Amino acid sequence: MRLLLHTEFALLLKRAGIKQSAFARMSGVTARQVNRWCRGDATVPLWAAGYVAALTHVPSHTIALMCSANAFTWQEVLGIANDADMVTARSAMKEMALRYHPDQGGSDAAMVRVNDAWSQARAWYRRR
């Protein structure tokens, strides 16, 4: 399983219908730590992502599919609404780039996903 961006982890919680505080109680970590994972202040551990996916009552072979790169739209990766304008998308991309850039302590894989989401956003806004 790959490293999840904070927006993707928050979306998995939302899809599972689990609040951050409830997930904290079930997993034995503090609610503050879960909130830090959802805000991107801390890296989401793989066990937490797998636990959220398991709580959605899906077979184990689909857990990897839920966390695959194709499971999230570019709006979900950037953490913006589906009807957001280009300015909002650009500011979200800048925030994500500052957070996940390898020079700032992020990983190359995370930055590739952010760049891919941004290129999809630019193409989508050009077609509009």
Image: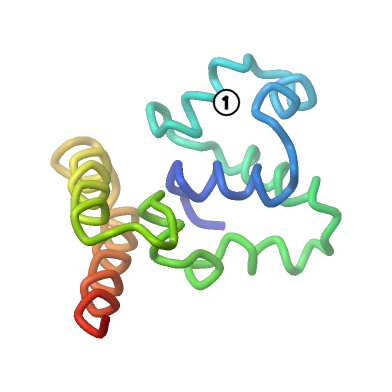
Residue 38: x and y in percent read 50, 34
Name above or below for residue 87 compared with residue 121.
Answer: above
For badge 1, the amino acid type reads: Val
Q: How many marks?
A: 1
Q: Residues within 10 Å of mark 1 (few under 14, many from 20)?
A: many
Residue 125: x and y in percent read 24, 74
Residue 86 picture quarter? bottom left
Mark 1 falls on what kind of element?
helix
Name above or below for residue 59 compared with residue 32.
Answer: below
Looking at the picture, tell me which residue is in the foreground, 119 or 43.
119
Residue 2: x and y in percent read 50, 56
Residue at 41%, 56% (x, y): give it: 77
Looking at the picture, tell me which residue is in the foreground, 107 or 90.
90
- Quarter of the image that includes the C terminus: bottom left
Name above or below for residue 13 compared with residue 74.
Answer: above
- Quarter of the image that includes the N terminus: bottom right
- Label 1 belongs to which residue? 34
Residue 93: x and y in percent read 23, 52
Residue at 65%, 45% (x, y): give it: 14
**Coloring scheme used:** rainbow
Residue at 55%, 42% (x, y): give it: 10
Looking at the picture, tell me which residue is in the foreground, 79 or 62.
79
Classify residue 116 as left or right of residue 81. left
- Give the farthest residue toward the bottom: 127
Residue at 65%, 42% (x, y): give it: 13
Looking at the picture, tell me which residue is in the foreground, 21 or 30.
21
Residue 113 picture quarter? bottom left
